[in-house]
Structure formats: structure tokens, C-alpha cells
Amino acid sequence: MSNKTAIAIVGASGRMGQMLIKAVLDNDNATLAGVTERAGHDWIGQDLGQCMGGAPIGVIVSDDPLEVFAKSQAIIDFTAPAATIAHAELAAQARAVHVIGTTGFAPDDLKKLSAAARHAPIIRAGNMSLGVNLLTKLTQKVAQALDADFDIEIVESHHKHKVDAPSGTALMLGEAAAAGRGVTLDDVSDRGRDGITGERKRGDIGFHAIRGGDVVGEHDVIFAADGERIVLRHLATDRNIFARGAVKAALWGQDKGPGEYDMMDVLGL
Ligand SMILES: NC(=O)C1=CN([C@@H]2O[C@H](COP(=O)(O)OP(=O)(O)OC[C@H]3O[C@@H](n4cnc5c(N)ncnc54)[C@H](O)[C@@H]3O)[C@@H](O)[C@H]2O)C=CC1
Ligand SMILES: O=C(O)C1=N[C@H](C(=O)O)C[C@H](O)C1
């Protein structure tokens, strides 16, 4: 039997799906167990290699996650919240590691993921890159060092196709800033001001989303005081940083028990 980890990619035709397939195929410790797309998608039943514009590779795109998960040790999922919730139940049944990059979950969705994580490991992060996870740590440290004389604002930019705001990364950064300050993000979050808003409330954490063109992902955490300003910035220029992180997480999760993990755990940050 191969000692490579068998990884399934769901959402194969997506911007991230295609990057993830390449990242698995490029990794010496991983093998592609199968791929899925949503029912009715025109890739279903076709050879994946040809769908991606190359030669046939003998992997047929499936619309049956149960069949694909049964032969997988890890599932990497960058799809959409409803799909990821359904995948989490199936991955738990298959006792496979579920790596979740999907963003835009509602609080009830997160409860369902927690329930699934009682049966198998779930590794979830709004951003799987090393750079953003480091930035998240720095954000917490800076927020801890400064008092509320420094107003915190988080500004994110993404491509025109992105459907959720604030981005998962912006929320990670906001959570880290709130933790650094010793407050709960829900109590201080101020999202997308518009109209006569009144003066900024001391201690609030503001969120702003820019959408346009092909921007991969940019995040600024601004600490603004009277007379000075600190800006922590991450610029993503290649989606491969997220894909490589996700494959690393799938391999890392192989000897872990059921539970919820994030990229900080994977990276040891
Ligand atoms: N955590 C991270 O590091 C990153 C997270 N993301 C997140 O990943 C998600 C996907 O982003 P993109 O690839 O840009 O979107 P996309 O729209 O290009 O791809 C999503 C794919 O999922 C497929 N899909 C939907 N329902 C499905 C189902 N039931 N079964 C199988 N496939 C299904 C769609 O048909 C589509 O091909 C978003 O939530 C985004 O925010 C994106 C980049 C990095
Ligand atoms: O949708 C995207 O593209 C991205 N989504 C993630 C997020 O919501 O933060 C990560 C990255 O910024 C790209």
C-alpha cells in the first residue's frame, strides 16, 4: 500500500479547486483520491485532466462525495457554506480529515461543523497562507500593546467574484485584535459605515470591503492614533499560497484525533 496520503478535492472547477488539484499532484507525499463538483456541473463524468485543458489523467469528476470520500484520508474543501456543511457530515462518517477554506459561515453553520468535528478532525481557517497567519499573531500582539487611543480599522480588497464580506481573513484579524484587547469582537465590530454615522466609538473595530477586478486578496490592519498610525499589511498575489497551506494541513491532520484545529496549530504559531 502507498504511504502517500489520499486527498480528495471538492469544487474541482473553482478558482481554488484547480489550484488545490495542482498542489496535490505536485506534492510527493500526497495522491489525488478523487474530485467532485456540484450536481449538474458540465465537468461531471469527464476526465479531470481534459477539463483542466491538458491530457487525460484517469480521474473522473464525480457528483457523489460519499463515493469519493470513502477512498480518501483527507478532503480539501474551498466551496460554499451549504456545500461544506454537507461535506462535513460525510467526511465525519468516513473518518477523514476535513480541511475547510470556505468562508462566509453563519453562526449556526459553525455549530454544525463543531458537531462533525466530534467524529474526525476538522482544520478550518479563513486564510491558509503562512503570511496571513503570522500577520494574525502580530495583530494580536500589537493590539495587546496599544490601548484604545489607537483606533483599529481592517480594510480588505478582493476580486469582483467574491460573494462574502467581510472576508474570512478580515474576521480572523478582527478576532485577533479583539483578543489582544481582551474584548469580544461581536461587542465592538463596526461594519461598512454609511450615512450620518456619528463619531467613531472608542474601542470599535471597523471593517471595510473593496471588490474589483482580479485582486487575489489584500488586508490592512490599521492602528490609528492622534499623530501616528501603524499599518500591518498582507498582499496575496498567487492563490498557490492558500493551496499549499491546505495540502500541508491535510498531511498534518493525519495523526490527529477528532476536534477543531486551525492553521495556527498546523504552522505551530
Ligand atoms: N481559506 C483560504 O485560504 C481561502 C478561502 N477561500 C474561500 O474558498 C471559497 C471558494 O473560493 P473560490 O475558489 O474563489 O470560489 P469558486 O466559486 O471559484 O469555486 C467554488 C467551487 O465550488 C463548487 N461547488 C459548489 N457547491 C458544491 C458542491 N455541493 N459540491 C462540489 N462542488 C461545489 C462550485 O461549483 C465552484 O466550482 C470561498 O468561500 C472563498 O472565500 C478562497 C481562497 C483562500
Ligand atoms: O474569496 C477569496 O478569494 C479569498 N477568500 C479568503 C477570505 O475570505 O479571506 C482568503 C483570501 O483572502 C481569498
Image: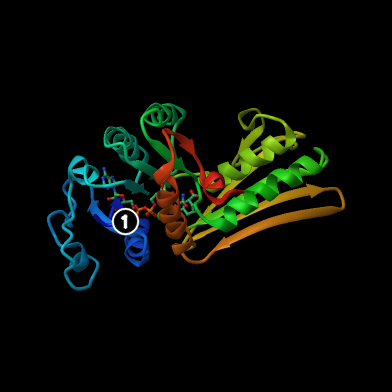
The residue positioned farthest toward the left in the image shown: 45
Name the spot of residue 108 as percent of width and height, x first: 42, 26
Residue beneath disc 1: 3
The structure residue drawn at horizontal position 56% and vertical position 42%, both measured from the top left corner, is 171
Front-most of 125 and 148? 125
The structure residue drawn at horizontal position 39% and vertical position 26%, both measured from the top left corner, is 115
Front-most of 238 and 116? 116
Front-most of 55 and 181? 55
Name the spot of residue 187 as percent of width and height, x first: 65, 27
Depicted 17 relative to depicted 86: above or below: below
Name the spot of residue 68 as percent of width and height, x first: 21, 46
Depicted 44 relative to depicted 179: above or below: below
Left/right of residue 112 with respect to residue 39 in the rendered view = right
Amino acid type assigned to the residue bearing label 1 in the image: Asn
Secondary structure of the residue carrying numbered label 1: loop
Name the spot of residue 172 as percent of width and height, x first: 57, 43
Which quarter of the image is occupied by the N terminus? bottom left
The structure residue drawn at horizontal position 31% and vertical position 36%, both measured from the top left corner, is 95
* Quarter residue 120 falls in: top left
